[in-house]
Image (cartoon, coloured by chain):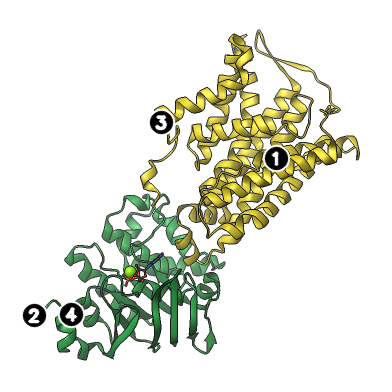
Chain colours: A yellow, B green
Amino acid sequence: MFAEQILNGLTLGSTYALIALGYTMVYGILELINFAHSEIYMTGAFIGLIMVTVYKMPFPLALIIAMAGSCLLGVTIEKVAYKPLRKSTRIAPLISAIGVSIFLQNAALILAGPQVRAFPVNFKSASIKLGQSIQMSSLQLLILLISIILMVGLHFLIHRTKLGQAMRATAQDKEAAQLMGIKIDRVISFTFAIGSALGGAAGVLVGVYFNSVDPMMGFFPGLKGFVAAVLGGIGNIPGAMLGGLILGIVEVLGAVYMSRYKDAIAFAVLIIILLVKPTGLLGRKLQEKV
Amino acid sequence: MLRLENVTAHYGTIQALKGVSINVNEGEIVTVIGANGAGKTTLLKTICGLVSATSGKVYFYDMDITNLPTSDIVAAGIVMVPEGRRIFPRMTVLENLQLGGYLNRNKSETKANMERVFELFPILKDRLHQIAGTLSGGEQQMLAIGRALMSRPKLLLLDEPSMGLAPKIVLSIFDIIRQINREGTTILLVEQNAHMALSTAHKAYVLETGRILMEDTAEKLLHNEQVRKAYLGEA
Ligand SMILES: Nc1ncnc2c1ncn2[C@@H]1O[C@H](COP(=O)(O)OP(=O)(O)O)[C@@H](O)[C@H]1O
Ligand SMILES: [Mg+2]
């Protein structure tokens, strides 16, 4: 029973981790909270849904197209809403982000209507026995696996490729990165592209998991992904993964005892972390970022 | 090789450069000395495109490079070692050097360039896998210069390489600056440490509140009455 709850928590947590990565990567490079991230997540879910229901695509292909679509949306948002404000006050892009978020929610309401739609996927939902008494659905296993693959892929990209090295350099010192010949505008675009693709993937996975997609679906997971990013230390990539998993487990276990407050748990976690260790679990001291 | 014609630069309404013209010939070490706030850093940043010139021209050989993107200027062969070193503190020495060679796709060339950096700074080879932020100030300065050399620049811009370093280390850094120059790299050096700069350079300019005040051989400026009073701390 307990081990099963942990598995449930890990499954949910892995989707929070995917969302948190988008927040943390963008913050790491621009010190901007991309409030439109929750709508990128929602858009990913809708694209996946359309690909599966309208175009009858197999799930993996639908997932990839949803990621590509979210990626395009994220890059466009950066170009249109944030880049022109890069030299203005810090609050300006934040307000712009909230504007984009509201715009996308309402665009989805107009295009898709407010109703909640089912996300039917066509695969056998068997339940898998792990050991004596632990059961996991094949859907959970799939979500967990896809999340892990995406996170391992991201780790590889960031630590083993030239682009990843350029991203880390840009996050540490934009001016010095330019002096190496790095085109930082391009690196920033890539960061939005990758973060948004992960967010879109999370949207599809959660849509399938709860069999529900709607224009407002990004609100809570978006906030929780943000909490996960802060919990791990905003700007820190392994931190976002860890924060997501911990938040998922805490939420699932918490809901066993006080199910009415399920969505409040994340905020309790946020308040505690801000009081106890504002830099997050793996965060650096703030003063180090000059 | 590098020619600035009446370059001005602003931060908002503050004018940091008020029409600066300088000339750097191939093979030389040219220095610009000036007090804190004179506009030395702004001058170098304007050359490499980090600050945009509001008027005037920057020529590199015969190419107009005024306000080109920094990546193009680096690709053309101008690399700056910024004030305060600005190494990537959470990366290893090796990664810092790799980033210095970011624009070079040729692996064997990159390897050869790194070997050359190790010849100049053997200490970096010993510290290869150390996190750069944990190096001493002098080592960080060596890494910053080594990183810049990884792209084999034709013109090296140095912003106050002596800043915050012990006198002994300053001497060895300037020895290496001379050696880099002897091996064929042209150098534009800005410094508050006028004594070191003037005894190292061939030609020198004095910059004061955004204007070039004097220009002569470094040798002559070192013995100039006015310079000795204002910049060499002599009464
Ligand atoms: N980012 C900035 N914003 C506003 N003013 C600046 C900025 N950087 C430099 N300045 C101003 O420009 C002038 C020249 O500065 P700088 O080029 O850094 O001088 P130096 O390198 O000779 O000490 C100074 O008056 C300084 O206050
Ligand atoms: Mg300066």
Q: Tell me which chain the residue with mark 1 is part of.
A: A
* Image quadrant where residue B116 sits: bottom left
Note whether B107 is above or below A151 in the view shown.
Answer: below
In this rendering, the label closer to the viewer, 3 or 1 = 1
The residues tagged by marks 1 and 2 sit, at their Cα atoms, a distance apart of 68 Å
Residue at image mark 1: A39
Kind of residue at disc 2:
Ala
Q: Secondary structure at mark 1?
A: helix
Residue designated by label 4: B230
Q: Seen in the image, is B73 located left or right of residue B30?
A: right
Q: Are marks 4 and 3 on the same chain?
A: no
Q: Position of residue A242 (x, y in %)?
A: 53, 31
Q: Label 3, label 1: how many angstroms apart (C-alpha)? A: 29 Å
Can marks 1 and 4 be said to lie on one chain?
Answer: no
Q: Residues within 10 Å of mark 4 (few under 14, many from 20)?
A: few
Q: Looking at the image, which is closer to me, B23 or A147?
A: B23
